[in-house]
Amino acid sequence: MDATEIPALPFVDEHATTVEANADAVWHELGAMMHGSRGFRVAVSDPGHELAYIGHHPFSTYALIFHLDETPQGNTRLRAETRADFPGRKGAVYRRLVIGTGAHALFVRHMLTKVRKNAA
């Protein structure tokens, strides 16, 4: 999978926060947070604007896309969009375990909180 295939993945969810820092600081913190993460590789890297990671395993193909938008106040609106496909019966069970339980949303909100605190 590459960046051109991300839009074809079904939308899962989006979470957002406002970071009291400019987009460059947020971008730097996103990179530091995701550095060395397993299961992800960079698909899109548009510094200060968008950073997309993709990955896959037997139960899912997924993308985590971070969108950065500067506000008029000089802060950054950070959005984390998740797209994923969960093929077959095992994929459906995996989706229920990860998405259905709220574990994924909790994990993404935790990441956004970490970036918000560390970038400010």
Image (cartoon, rainbow, N blue to C red):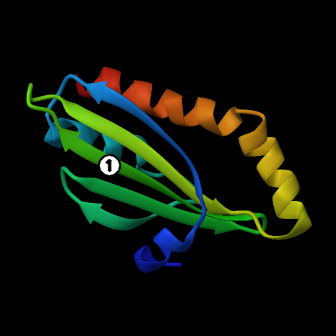
Tell me if 14 is positioned left or right of 100 in this view: left
| Residue 24 placement: quadrant | top left
- Across and down, in percent, residue 89 comes to 91, 65
Which residue is nearer to you in this view: 76 or 117? Answer: 76
Q: Which amino acid type is marked by label 1? A: His
**Residue at 84% from the left image edge and 58% from the top image edge:** 92
Q: Tell me the crowding category of disc 1: few under 14, some 14 to 19, or many 20 or more residues within 10 angstroms, Cα based.
A: many
In the image, 103 versus 57, the foreground residue is 103
Q: Position of residue 52 (x, y in %)?
A: 40, 59
Residue 41, given in percent of the width and then of the height, sits at 47, 64
Q: Is residue 2 left or right of residue 51?
A: right
Q: Secondary structure at mark 1?
A: strand
| In the foreground, 109 or 7 | 7
* Residue at the right extreme of this rendering: 89
79 to 116, vertically: above or below: below
- Residue drawn where x is 25% and y is 28% of the image: 119
Q: Say which residue label 1 marks.
A: 67
111 shown above or below 46? above
| Direction from residue 109 to residue 91 in the image, left or right | right
Residue at 61% across / 29% down in the picture? Answer: 106
- The quadrant the C terminus occupies is top left
